[in-house]
Amino acid sequence: YNKGTFKSSKKSPLISIDPQQTLDKKITQSRKRNFSNVYPKPKPKNLSIEECACLIKQSKVAFVTGAGISLSASIPTQQELELSLGQETKTPCDRFIKTAINNPQKIVKTIENFFANLKKAKPTPAHYAIKKMAIYKAAPILTGNFDLLHEKTGIKVEFKTTKHWTKKAILKIDAIICIGSRDDFGAILGKYKKLNPLGILVAINKEVPDYLSDDDFIIQENIQKIVPKLAQLTVNKRY
């Protein structure tokens, strides 16, 4: 991350001070870390959309997406699919096993409906916005989603895995922008924070994800509304 000059748009109603100055201050505070701390209830720092756009423009970034980005496309999350199948990990014999034995066709029908929804689903505004930012920054998109909605926008993505996430690759990334990701599926974020302790982690999510700490950042907004606005600010040549 390199400090730069960022002039806030006069038309922006969200912030009245220079986001460059506030971003620099927050990054400095974030890097004063006490690694002995444990964060059972993380309280990440709030980041404005202007500050996030400034960060993306000035940094080498990677985008990580989760199921939350596809909810408005009527695709259930993994937790919702497991619930509909009756998979209850807290019980020794869950409803899935009982249904699979007594009514296997119900299980088959649920899975068929799930894949039918995947086939007809269309990318959301957030998917297209991420594509726009990824192309602008030549940034990778890593996802745990297999709904192919990123691919339907015409961009290549990498499945979220640590296989090719080497230390050399991690150290090149100044910041990771997580969008709609509820957990650290694939252990990407944990590996990033371990190997690149000065790396910046930003989550765009309605709820605070467990993978954040007090040193990280969050934008708690509606993904389908805020991500397209973020893309507009990021690629705006005036900034």
Image (cartoon, helix red, strand yellow):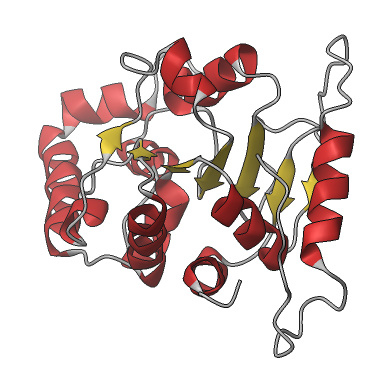
Q: Residue at x 70, y 82 (%)?
A: 9
Q: Residue at x 25, y 31 (%)?
A: 99
Q: Residue 117: x and y, percent? A: 19, 58
Q: Quadrant of the N terminus?
A: top right
Q: Is residue 40 left or right of residue 113?
A: right
The residue lying toward the viewer, choosing from 95 and 57, is 57
Residue 43 shows up from this direction:
no
- Residue 34 vertical position relative to residue 133 in the rendered view, above or below: above
Residue 135 shows up from this direction:
yes
The residue lying toward the viewer, choosing from 237 and 78, is 237
The residue lying toward the viewer, choosing from 27 and 40, is 27
Q: Residue 174: x and y, percent? A: 58, 34
Q: Residue at x 83, y 69 (%)?
A: 18
Q: Is residue 188 left or right of residue 101?
A: right
Disc count in the image?
A: 0
Q: Residue at x 50, y 50 (%)?
A: 180
Q: Is residue 230 left or right of residue 215?
A: left
The residue lying toward the viewer, choosing from 61 and 202, is 61
- Residue 185 vertical position relative to residue 63 in the rendered view, above or below: above
Q: Quadrant of the C terminus?
A: bottom right
Q: Residue 23: x and y, percent? A: 79, 53
Q: Is residue 163 left or right of residue 62?
A: left
Q: Residue 7: x and y, percent? A: 73, 73
